[in-house]
Image (cartoon, coloured by chain):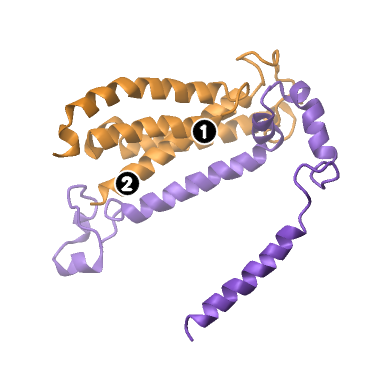
Amino acid sequence: MRMQEILILKIVVRFVIPFIQVYGFYVITAGHLSPGGGFAGGTIVAASMVLYALTFDASQGLEKLSHERASLFESLGAIWYVALGLLGIMVGGNFLTNGQIGIPLGTPGYLISGGLIPLLSFGIGIKVAVTVVSLYYSLVEED
Amino acid sequence: MRQIIPVFLTLVLGIALLLVVAEMPTFGDINNPAHNVVSERYINQGVRETGAQNIVTAIITDYRAYDTLGEVTVLFAAIAAVLTVLNRLRLGVICPEDRERGLTDEDAGDPDSKDSC
C-alpha cells in the first residue's frame, strides 16, 4: 500500500499540522522569554511542512510553497535582518544595535519587550523554515 | 600494509587528541578562562541592556547579532548552492548527454523536461 493511500495517516496529519505550526510560531515569538528562538522555531515550522509533503505528496507540498515563493521568502528573511541592522546606522548608532540607540526595551518578561530581538527572531524563523523546506523539496523532487 | 597506515595514523591522532582533552580546564571550575569579564557582564547586565529574559537569545540576537547575520548568510549561501546544483535545467544549463540526444538550449528552461546529467 502506498503512503498516499493510508487514510488514518492523512486524517491524523491534517489534524496535527496546525498544532505543530502554532507551537513553532510560539517558539519563534517567545524566543526572548523562554528557550527557543528563530532557529529552533523555524525548524519546527519546517517540520510541519515536511510532514505534509511526506504524508501527501511532494508535488502537493510544492503547490503550497512553490520554488518562486520559497526564494522570495528566503530573500525577504535575509533582507529583513539586514534592514533592521541598518536601522541602527540610520539613527546614528552601530550596525545591529538595539537598546543603545533608544529603541524602547519594554518590561523584561512581557511578550513585547527586548526591542528589536523579537523582530530579528521572526526574520530568522521565516528564513530557517523556508530553507529547510525548500531543501527537502528539491532533494525529493530529483527522482 | 594498506590497512596498517590508517590504523597507525588514527591511533597517533587519537592519543594526541586525548592528551589535549586531559589538559582542558575542569568543567564548572570557577577559575576557568571562560569565566571572565564578558560573561560576567552578560549575566549581570543582560536583562537591563537588552530587555530579553532569555540570556541565550539576548546574546545571539543582540550582543552577537553580527555573528547571527553570518549564520543567516551561511544558510542563504547553502540553499542557493543546493538549488543551483539540483535545478540546473531550470536555470538554462544543458548537459552534454542531453545535447547528444538532440536537446537544444531552448529545452533548458522547460520545467517539464526532467532530464539531468
- Residue A37 place in picture, x, y as percent: 56, 29
| Position of residue B67 measured from the top left corner of the image (x, y, whole percent) | 65, 42
The N terminus of chain A lies in quadrant: top left
- Residue at 72 percent across and 65 percent down: it is B19
Q: Which amino acid does label 1 sit on?
A: Ala
Secondary-structure class at tag 1: helix
Q: Mark 2 lies on which chain?
A: A
| Residue B116 in view of the camera | yes
**For residue B50, above or below residue A60:** above
Q: How crowded is mark 2: few (under 14 residues within 10 Å), some or many (20 or more)?
A: some
Earlier sequence position, callout 2 versus callout 1: 1
Q: In this view, does B33 lie above or below A125?
A: below
Which residue is labeled 1 in the image?
Answer: A40
- Could you say which chain is coloured purple in the image? B
Q: Can residue A62 be seen in this view?
A: no
Per the image, the residue denoted by label 2 is A138
Q: Of discs 2 and 1, which sits in the foreground?
A: 1
Q: Which mark is residue A74?
A: none
Judge from the rendering whether residue B107 lies leftward or rightward of residue A105; answer left or right: left
Chain identifier, orange in the render: A
Residue at 52%, 37% in the rendered image: A78
Question: Which residue is depicted at the point 48% across and 45% down?
Answer: B76
Residue A109, position in %: x, y?
Answer: 67, 15
Q: Quadrant of residue B65?
A: top right
Instruction: Identify which residue, A18 or A11, lies in the foreground.
Output: A11
Question: Amino acid under label 2?
Answer: Ser
- Secondary structure beneath dot 2 equals helix
Name which quarter of the figure residue B16 lies in: bottom right
Q: Mark 1 falls within which chain?
A: A
